[in-house]
Image (cartoon, rainbow, N blue to C red):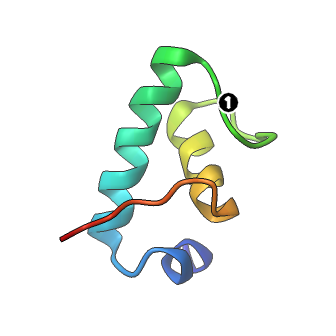
Amino acid sequence: MDELLLVVDSKYKLAYTSAKRAKIIKKTNHSSVDNRCVKPVGKALEEILAGKVTAKFE
């Protein structure tokens, strides 16, 4: 969790971004990194940690 908060500056932004990406992963069954997790949310968090997913908040 601490490593993820170094990538995303807020727990709320992290939750929102990972949920959005998890929906896409579940729908397409595609991830941009080699995952250790099998669940879509875990896969999304791994992608965020790897820097493959970014989100812009205004």
Q: Nearer the viewer, residue 31 or 5?
A: 31
Residue 40 to residue 16: above or below? above
Total residue callouts: 1
| 40 relative to 31 in the view: left or right | left
Q: Residues within 10 Å of mark 1 (few under 14, many from 20)?
A: few
**Residue 36 percent across, percent down from the top left:** 78, 41
Q: Label 1's element?
A: loop
| Residue behind mark 1 | 38
Q: Which residue is at a point 34% across and 57% down the rendered structure image? A: 15
Quadrant housing the C terminus: bottom left
Residue sitting at 60 percent across and 18 percent down? 29
Mark 1: amino acid: Val
**Which corner quadrant of the image does residue 35 belong to?**
top right
**Relative to the observer, which residue lies in front, 37 or 6?**
6
Q: Is residue 16 above or below residue 35?
A: below
> Is 58 positioned to the left or the right of 37 in the image?
left
